[in-house]
Image (cartoon, rainbow, N blue to C red):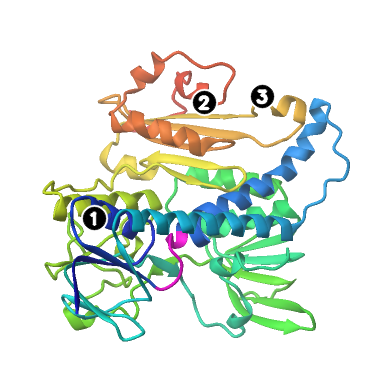
Amino acid sequence: MEQFDLIVIGGGSGGVRAARIAANHGARVALAEGYRMGGTCVIRGCVPKKLMVYASRFAQEFEEAAGFGWLVDAPRFDWATLKTRRDAEVARLEGIYRSNLLNAGVQILEGRATLLDRHTVILPNGQRFQAKHILIASGAQPARGPDIPGHELAIDSNGFFDLPTLPRRVVVQGAGYIALELACVLHLLGADVTVVVRGEQILRGFDDDLRQHLATEMAHSGLQFRFGREVQAIARVGDALQVHLDNGDTLATDCVLRALGRGPNTQGLGLEGVGITLDAQGAIPVDDFSQTTVPNIYAVGDVTNRVNLTPMAIREGHAFADTVFGSTPRRVDHTLVPTAVFTTPEVGVVGLTEEQALKSHPRLDVYRAVFRPLKATLSGHTGKMLLKLLVDRDTDRVLGFHAVGPDTGEMAQLVGVALQLQATKTALDATLAVHPTAAEELVTMRTPAVRHNL
């Protein structure tokens, strides 16, 4: 049996980074992947989704252009062209991932690996390999949700990228960031979209002001919401589909997209056989160094269900390799996580929500600005931006940033740096504004909208 210092199971962002860094530290590394290199982010997530978001926003740009003197005569969108170019870019990126692994000296094993014991994996073709250390980085997969009648007629977020044409009517089930991002893309590209939400608001876990503002803006754009409703069944009626809701209503549609979140991709890995017990969500429990209860087996990324974002998987993979093979033990901080949601309008956040902040910082000042961007004065677009800062009155530290509007994801990245440096509101106030920009509101808000626990 061929021997390695490390076998990585999974060729996504976390696994690839771990394999490359471990190889750079001098380890003999193999990486097993049963699909395509690059993981969800490159193949069926961040990258192709963002390309679709860019495509969809041209619809709004064309509408706004007239206010600036541009005459755009009947723009026409072609789904096939976008799909072809998007898929070509994904293929290019996958090739880069493979090349980078090979150039680092990593041996690629084709196939999904299963653990036979603590040091041995087997591929579908029967080949077996051994390693001193094993890293599981198999990521996550779309959650199936309840097996309602007709569930097989729906697609999930993976199936979205396989759509051969743009559906005329779409029902999206779900209210998380994936559901909302894809709903916005489909709507702006020309589909009639209805979003069915089980709860009373979208984006559970985000700041309440942000959730309300985004829902209002999305509704104003033409998206239709059915709050407090559940999909009970899906049926085919002729060439169309019919969605049955729990209140007896039916929705006629051409496509049902069930985006009900994602769960750890741990099935069939042989974890129970080596003594690893999954948690209630099916994730692999690990310690601060990504080590499982089996000392030589580690796990990083979405499969651990800590912070399920590509940059975090990359950081965890890098820290693992430095810890185990680089003689530099490193923990990863999971507390300060800048995040963007690529709906239209866009969302950017970092730090605590107002509800979270109040639990540990009762003397909380809330600064809030809601305004139409300068561009809207000529374009006529009615959308409004939201910028919100949370400040601990006792220490003056900025605890959270929440925003809805153009380029707020870019803002969140830079505000994240400020929060990492424990910036104070006084420091923001002392920073000269860049005018005219939307971001200047961050350094010009002087009066709290709400003062908790005075």
Q: Amino acid at mark 1?
A: Ala
Q: Earlier in the sequence, mark 2 or mark 1?
A: 1
Q: Measure the alpha-carbon separation of dots 2 and 1.
A: 42 Å
Q: Nearer the viewer, mark 2 or mark 1?
A: 1
Query: What residue do we see at 60% from left, 50% from top?
Result: 51
23 relative position to 219: left or right: left
Q: Percent from the top left, x then y, of residue 151?
A: 58, 81
Residue bearing mark 2? 439
Secondary element at tag 1 = helix
Within 10 Å of disc 2 (Cα), the crowding (few <14, some 14-19, many 20+) is some
Q: Nearer the viewer, mark 3 or mark 1?
A: 1
Q: Nearer the viewer, residue 273 or 15?
A: 15
Q: Percent from the top left, x then y, of residue 145?
A: 49, 75
Above or below, comparing residue 215 to residue 392 in the picture: below
Residue bearing mark 1? 23
24 relative position to 267: left or right: left
Query: What residue do we see at 61% from left, 66% from top?
Result: 160
Asked if residue 162 is among those painted magenta in the image, a careful observer would answer: no
Q: Measure the alpha-carbon separation of dots 3 and 2.
A: 12 Å
Above or below, comparing residue 338 to residue 202 in the picture: above
Q: Earlier in the sequence, mark 3 or mark 1?
A: 1
Within 10 Å of disc 3 (Cα), the crowding (few <14, some 14-19, many 20+) is few
In this picture, which residue range is highlighted in magenta?
34-40
Q: Quadrant of the N terminus?
A: bottom left
The answer to which quarter of the image holds residue 96 is bottom left
Secondary element at tag 2 = helix
